[in-house]
Image (cartoon, rainbow, N blue to C red):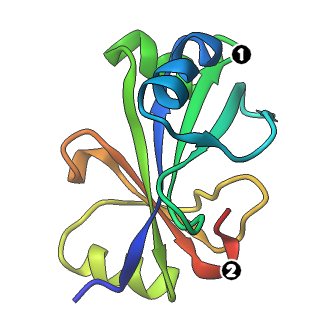
Amino acid sequence: MTAFDGIACVSIAVRSIDEALPDYTEGLGLTVTHEPQVSPRGFDLRWVELGAGGRTFLELLEPTSEDSPVHRFLERRGPGVYQVRFIADDVGGTLGELAGRGVRTIEGAHAEGHADVGFVHPASTHGVLFEVMGRQARP
């Protein structure tokens, strides 16, 4: 059995955080929980908490350059779910178990600033990138 211990975050690609944010805060009544962040990978992001306790978030991603993977995603697919971030106690063991079942993982990939992270290729998950993050690395 795969050792996922919940979902930490669902990342949503948007063309404009400023335009999308009211749909989540005013429309859905959710709360922005972190200051705006800028990624060196060419996108801005904003965290919106889902429920009490700060265990699960939505992460709105807006591209800031045409080199950004988020920009490429929006060009190909339009706004929507970009990735789902799962928590695991043993990232390497979880990815190894998945690979043993024939799931395609992305070798050598990591999230900026986090060593305890791996990815499942969207080809194995019907078009959605899965990130597997160690408990200590989570937001």
In-front residue for pair 133/105: 133
Distance from Cα at disc 2 to Cα at disc 1:
28 Å
Helix, strand, or loop for circle 1? loop
Q: Disc 2 marks which amino acid? A: Gln
**Drawn side of residue 97 relative to residue 44, left or right:** left
Mark 1 lies on residue: 64
Could you tell me how many numbered marks the image carries? 2
Q: Disc 1 marks which amino acid? A: Thr
**Drawn side of residue 129 relative to residue 61, left or right:** left
Task: Tell me the residue at 64%/74% (across/down).
Answer: 116
Q: Which mark is residue 136?
A: 2
Residue 59 appearing in the image: yes
In the rendered image, residue 19, in percent from the top left (x then y), is placed at: 57, 10
In-front residue for pair 98/4: 4
Helix, strand, or loop for circle 2? helix
Task: Tell me the residue at 61%/21% (across/down).
Answer: 62
Query: Which quarter of the figure is the C terminus placed in?
Result: bottom right
In the rendered image, residue 104, in percent from the top left (x then y), is placed at: 29, 60
In-front residue for pair 108/7: 7
Residue 68 appearing in the image: no
